[in-house]
Image: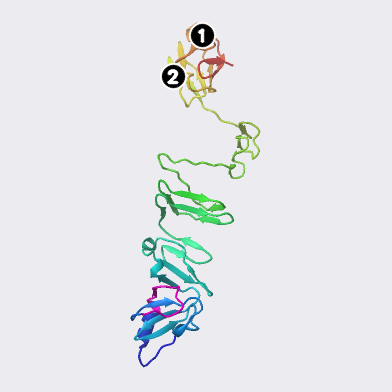
């Protein structure tokens, strides 16, 4: 900056340099001005602005003072309603942002540099209609204790890699959905969903059937001793061990095509300990029920969506 020390105090010069609100950045010659007007000198400058291209011209006491543009300098352009940043060669529009929101953040809440963006505490919220996009080749990293909140109508769009360390992900909205269009894997092969076949693998990265379990399978089993028992959604194998007559009712087959129930009589032989299996609706192999007096007799029933069939 050049200035006349006889006219301007050092405090005045400091004020001029700090309060950088610019009226226009497209002029090449000085306009009619009043004290405090500021411009970024454009193009090939003429008149009193000759040789000051890219610098900031400030009019004070009928004289033009010039502030040399330094890399990283950020000023507001009044006629554009926008901030511009000097990159060492030219002035360019600053990235768009919500100034009212960012003004309320300090260095303990949001830290930014050209290398790393680090949101250090609190909840990062994207309002309705907002899109957060990570482009291909970028990486997102969330550490323990970070909360990410995306409100209804906003989009979290990732076209790259995201690494989440030591963090629980909770989808707790009443209508929250997780949609995956590619392959899904947990710990490489703990759980795998193959997008091309739709097959699900547990313990294998290459499932060869609708459900491929590479290991043992544990299914529910219970023993019933009462005179009646109604099987439910959480049943699979039911052991009948009643002293006396017992009726086990399996649910209606309607709407649960493919479901299987296993029922086995383990009580002593004889008509006094007869086990009967009936259905809440439909038929069982065309009849109303099946019954046995024999100890260790077992049945497997499968629904076709309308009736039960013994396998």
Q: Residue lying at the far top in this picture: please name it.
A: 271
Residue 187: % across, % down: 59, 45
The foreground one among 59 and 129 is 59
Q: Residue lying at the far bottom in this picture: please name it.
A: 6
Our reading of the magenta stretch's main secondary structure is loop
Instruction: Report the quarter where the C terminus lies.
Output: top right
Residue 25 part of the magenta-drawn span: yes
Q: Is residue 296 visible?
A: no
Q: Secondary structure at mark 2?
A: strand
Q: Which residue is mark 2?
A: 230
Against 270, is 99 above or below? below
Residue 293: % across, % down: 53, 9
The foreground one among 19 and 278 is 19
Mark with earlier residue (2, 1): 2
Q: Which residues are magenta?
A: 17-32
- CA distance for labels 2 and 1: 19 Å
Q: Secondary structure at mark 1?
A: loop
Q: Which residue is mark 1?
A: 287
Residue at horizontal 44 percent and vertical 41 percent from the top: 176
Residue 238: % across, % down: 51, 21
Marks counted in the figure total: 2
Residue 206 part of the magenta-drawn span: no
* Colour scheme of the picture: rainbow
Residue 221: % across, % down: 52, 25
Against 140, is 3 above or below? below
Residue at horizontal 39 percent and vertical 73 percent from the top: 23
Against 258, is 187 above or below? below
Bin the neighbour count of mark 1 within 10 Å (Cα to Cα): few under 14, some 14-19, many 20 and up: few
The foreground one among 297 and 8 is 8
Bin the neighbour count of mark 2 within 10 Å (Cα to Cα): few under 14, some 14-19, many 20 and up: some
């Amino acid at each position: 900056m050049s200035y006349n020390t006889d006219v301007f105090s050092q405090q005045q010069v400091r004020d001029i340099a700090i309060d950088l609100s610019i009226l226009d950045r497209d002029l090449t010659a000085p306009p009619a001005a009043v004290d405090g007007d500021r411009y970024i000198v454009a193009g090939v400058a003429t008149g009193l602005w000759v040789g000051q291209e890219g610098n900031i011209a400030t009019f004070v006491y009928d004289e033009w003072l010039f502030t040399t543009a330094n890399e990283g300098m950020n000023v507001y352009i009044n006629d554009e309603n926008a901030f511009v940043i000097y990159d060492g060669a030219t002035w360019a529009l600053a990235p768009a942002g919500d100034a009212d929101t960012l003004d309320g953040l300090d260095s303990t809440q949001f830290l930014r540099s050209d290398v790393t963006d680090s949101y250090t505490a609190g909840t990062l919220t994207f309002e309705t209609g907002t899109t957060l996009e990570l482009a291909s080749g970028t990486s997102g990293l969330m550490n323990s204790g970070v909360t990410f909140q995306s409100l209804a109508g906003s989009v979290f769009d990732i076209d790259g890699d995201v690494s989440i360390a030591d963090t629980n992900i909770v989808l707790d909205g009443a209508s929250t959905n997780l949609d995956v269009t590619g392959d899904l894997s947990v710990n490489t092969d703990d759980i795998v969903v193959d997008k091309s076949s739709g097959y699900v693998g547990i313990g294998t990265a290459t499932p060869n059937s609708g459900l491929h379990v590479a290991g043992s399978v544990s299914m529910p089993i219970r023993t019933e001793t009462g005179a009646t028992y109604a099987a439910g959604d959480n049943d699979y194998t039911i052991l009948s061990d009643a002293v006396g007559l017992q009726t086990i009712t399996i649910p209606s087959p309607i709407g649960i095509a493919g479901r299987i129930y296993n029922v086995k009589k383990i009580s002593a032989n004889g008509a006094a300990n007869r086990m009967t299996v009936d259905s809440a609706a439909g038929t069982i192999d065309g009849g109303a029920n099946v019954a046995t007096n024999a100890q260790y007799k077992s049945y497997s029933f499968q629904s076709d969506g309308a009736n039960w069939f013994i396998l």
